[in-house]
Image: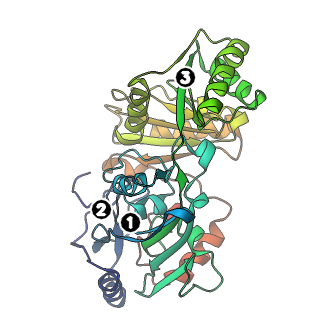
Amino acid sequence: MSAPFAIAGVVPRDVVTPHGVEELARTVRELYENGKAFAFLGGGTHRALGNAPRALHTVVRTVALDRVLEYAAEDQTITVEAGMTLAELDRVLAEHRQMLPLDVADREHATVGGVVATNVFGRRRQRYGTVKDHIVGVTIVRPDGTPARGGGRVVKNVAGFDLPKLMTGSLGTLGAIVSATFRVHPIADARASAVLAFDDANGAARAAQALVDARLDPESVAVYNGNALAVSFAGTAGGVAAQLRTLVEQVASRSGAADVRELVDDEPESYDQRERAVRRDGDWRFRIDAPPASRGWAIRPDVPSPPLAVPVAYPLLGVAFHAHAAAGMTSTADPWNALRERVSRETGANGRVVIEAMPDEARATTDAWGPPPSSLRLMRALKEAFDPRGLCNAGRFVGGL
């Protein structure tokens, strides 16, 4: 990024940091009434995501909205403001041995609002799902400056919309998320991980299928660098031990693993570091989504990766992440456009490649989202309903929304 508050390569004329919902609403209302294009920003961990905004006058930061508004530990729900970081939320929940199992590359900077707006997820999606499976309420400021609420603890709804689900993954194009209510989970009594090593991705695919056949219930399943399948279990001590034993004694042998071993001491952290790196490092970062059975997650471009940022895939989910420091190719997206064609050819219409970060000079050569989905017409109608003047993060999202 060329500037600390640039959005997808576009530098704003002004940056403001409201210190409360009323001040944020007033700021947004004034921008909207004066026809000034604006975007919202939390910790900035996903500033590179999406296409360049068509116009950007002001970036409105939400980091000063960082309070816990309500925490009912006995009901396993918590309501926090959008500027709270995931790391701080972890610390609050840990006091009651609870957690919000959403994985991000930088928990010290990623904020609640940003996580909701990008619908970010990691390997624990295998068990816990995405943001949509945890969010039960949301408060927003609409693009015209009007506050609204939806879901749990409703005061004022946007009629006809499931607002928590609608705001999840909207990339700030429908308004500012100012607080969210989540359903949280107890921290497991025990956790264990093991890695199965193979000669190639075919072995990892066999092991993933063997996991399903054995009816195991892993917390996460991830393939690193195409040939190392890492599986984690969480739950009671007895349940974790039994599942780990089945993995070693049955899944490894049936899938032809060259080696299998339990991860001990700081070894699980070394795999966590690799996963964070592929989501954070590199001039180019992209995600492949495809039906799991299509093996789209195993497709790899022939370009170098940064240190630690080896390809990471979730074979049971059909998702893969790649990062590349593609020296000599930073000004063109030709390799990634070719990759899109390959993924489409090998996985069918449901396969896609999303470029999550790229050099600024390459943005004119490709669309970060690829071909728009069949739901684009509905998405346009929603954008028109919330932002008829097209001033809120305009052009950054799918199909130029």
Question: CA separation, marks 1 and 2?
Answer: 7 Å
Q: Looking at the image, which residue sits at the far top?
A: 258
Q: Where is mark 3, residue-wise?
A: 194
Q: Where is mark 2, residue-wise?
A: 10
Question: Which of disc 3 and disc 2 is earlier in sequence?
Answer: 2
* Badge 3 vs badge 1, beta-carbon distance below 8 Å: no
* Foreground: disc 3 or disc 1: 3
Question: Which of disc 1 and disc 3 is earlier in sequence?
Answer: 1
Question: CA separation, marks 3 and 1?
Answer: 44 Å
Question: Which of disc 2 and disc 1 is earlier in sequence?
Answer: 2
Expressed as whole percent of the image width and height from the top left, the position of residue 9 reads: 31, 57
SS at mark 1? Answer: loop
Residue 352 visible in the snapshot: no
* Badge 1 vs badge 2, beta-carbon distance below 8 Å: yes
Quarter occupied by residue 299: top right
Residue type at tag 3: Ala
Expressed as whole percent of the image width and height from the top left, the position of residue 347 reads: 69, 38
* Foreground: disc 2 or disc 3: 3
Mark 2 surroundings: few (<14), some (14-19) or many (≥20) residues within 10 A: many
Judge from the rendering whether residue 229 lies leftward or rightward of residue 96; answer left or right: right
Q: Where is mark 1, residue-wise?
A: 53
Residue at (34%, 42%) from the top-left corner?
331
Residue type at tag 1: Pro
